[in-house]
Image: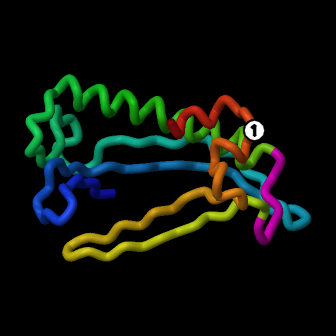
Amino acid sequence: MDVGIKLAGDMNFLIYDEVVVNSALDFSIENEIVYAEVHHVDVVKAGVPADRKLPIYDNMDLSEDLYEQFWNWAGEASTLWQDYLNSVIFNNGVPLPYWNLELMTETFFRPHSLMMVIDLFYNDVNKGIKGAVNGNKNTDMFK
């Protein structure tokens, strides 16, 4: 996955990097209910060199320490995502065709880029993910 940050209306990247998101899960469908267990979610550097100390392109003078902190956060966040998926989303199975949870997608096209946003959508638009799980501690990852 190529990830870049630009200012609105500007075609030049402030920062650009390559990322691999890798995940594995077991799932089954029984009586129109999806049961799944996510075994891992990994977010790691892609591209060359893989042991780089800074993003592939950096116009923000990012320090090596801050870049390392980002990758440490990404590793911790991926564990939180795995826990959230297992304990909140797939905990009791997801009835088909839809539960009160749906994957909402939007696709945006811009010159030289494509952005796809995938969001977990609960029927109560005003509460979103945090309100839908009624106090589950794992939702703090979305702050």
Of 33 and 135, nearer the camera is 135
Residue type at mark 1 is: Asn
On whether residue 93 falls in the magenta region, the answer is: yes
Q: How many marks?
A: 1
Count residues near mark 1 (Cα–Cα under 10 Å), then give few for <14, some for 14-19, many for 20+.
Answer: few
On whether residue 69 falls in the magenta region, the answer is: no
> Magenta segment range?
92-98
Of 38 and 112, nearer the camera is 112
* Quarter-of-image position of residue 138: top right
- Residue 47 percent location from the top left of the image: 23, 50
Q: Is residue 49 left or right of residue 133?
A: left
Residue at figure coordinates x 37%, y 73% from the top left: 108
Q: Is residue 23 left or right of residue 90?
A: left
- Residue 32 percent location from the top left of the image: 86, 67
- Residue 35 percent location from the top left of the image: 78, 53
Residue at figure coordinates x 72%, y 61% from the top left: 123
Query: In the current view of this chain or complex, which residue is farthest to the front?
Result: 126
Residue at mark 1: 134
Q: Is residue 103 left or right of residue 97?
A: left
Residue at figure coordinates x 73%, y 51% from the top left: 36
Q: Is residue 5 above or below residue 96?
A: above
Of 27 and 119, nearer the camera is 119
**Protein image colouring:** rainbow
Label 1's element? loop
Residue at figure coordinates x 76%, y 67% from the top left: 98
Q: Quadrant of the N terminus?
A: bottom left
